[in-house]
């Protein structure tokens, strides 16, 4: 199992009758460790993997170099197209959010700051269309991005989101769009149509 906890089991169940067979992984971080997209990729799904941190991006590029159905994007998903300053670590907690950095500063292994390009959910949908599964793990902005995703015309069959302590807010937003929660952990929620 590749996901952080049991998310993969519920993602695979929710996606078993998918027809588009495309996954969007926002905050992909690693090809295998804590990956909500890896099992789907192994089943032949195409993928857009978005990651802002250079070390993890390199690992994704190396892993999927010979997989033409997987596209790796070095950047962040934000609320406006442009540039964002990010504090970089090779761990899974690179972030543009001061609160997240403060939480992980002792164990995060931060090595410095850099500017990264940001794209929006709208940019992603315009360029790549719809997805059957979307994973959002952006260290501090995941639930905010969930709200943006849920306001679009795309209805992925399954959504996995890191809730950052905002689980009730995420649950209510997803439920209003017809999703049911099929899994919850201390970090993540999985919703299904």
Image: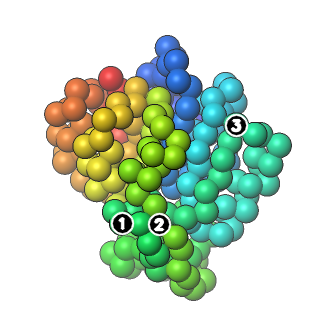
**Residue beneath label 2, please?**
118
- Residue 183 in view of the camera: no
Distance (Cα) linking label 1 and label 3: 27 Å
Q: Residues within 10 Å of mark 1 (few under 14, many from 20)?
A: few
CB atoms of marks 2 and 1 within 8 Å: yes
Task: Please tell me in which quadrant of the rendered image residue 1 appears.
Answer: top right
Mark 2 lies on a secondary structure that is: strand
Q: Farthest residue in the top direction?
A: 17
Front-most of residues 96 and 153: 153
Answer with left or right where residue 37 lies relative to residue 58: left
Q: Is residue 133 above or below residue 62?
A: above
Q: Is residue 6 above or below residue 53?
A: above
> Which of the colour schemes (rainbow, by chain, secondary structure, one colour) is used?
rainbow
Front-most of residues 83 and 39: 83
For the C terminus, which image quadrant? top left
Mark 3 lies on a secondary structure that is: loop
Q: Residue at 46% across / 34% down in the picture?
A: 130
| Sooner in the amino-acid sequence: mark 2 or mark 3 | 3
- Residue 13 in view of the camera: yes
Distance (Cα) linking label 2 and label 1: 7 Å
Mark 1 lies on a secondary structure that is: loop
Which mark, by number, is residue 69? Answer: 3
Which mark, by number, is residue 26? Answer: none
Residue 110 in percent (x, y) is at 56, 80
Residue 104 in percent (x, y) is at 44, 73
**Residue beneath label 1, please?**
80
Task: Please tell me in which quadrant of the rendered image residue 37 appears.
Answer: top right
């Amino acid at each position: 199992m590749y996901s952080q906890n049991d998310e993969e089991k519920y993602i695979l169940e929710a996606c078993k009758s998918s027809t588009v067979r495309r996954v969007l992984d926002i905050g992909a971080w690693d090809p295998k460790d804590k990956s909500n997209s890896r099992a789907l990729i192994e089943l032949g799904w195409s993928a857009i993997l978005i990651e802002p941190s250079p070390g993890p991006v390199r690992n994704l590029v190396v892993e999927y170099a010979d997989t033409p159905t997987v596209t790796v994007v070095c950047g962040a998903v934000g609320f406006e197209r442009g540039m964002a300053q990010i504090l970089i670590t090779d761990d899974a907690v690179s972030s543009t959010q001061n609160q997240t950095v403060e939480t992980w500063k002792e164990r995060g292994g931060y090595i410095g700051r850099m500017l990264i390009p940001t794209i929006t959910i709208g940019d992603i949908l315009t360029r790549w269309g719809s997805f059957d599964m979307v994973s959002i793990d952006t260290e501090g902005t995941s639930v905010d991005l969930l709200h943006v995703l849920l306001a679009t015309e795309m209805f992925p069959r399954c959504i996995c989101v890191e809730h950052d302590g905002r689980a009730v807010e995420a649950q209510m937003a997803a439920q209003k769009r017809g999703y049911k929660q099929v899994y919850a952990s201390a970090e993540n929620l999985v919703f299904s149509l």
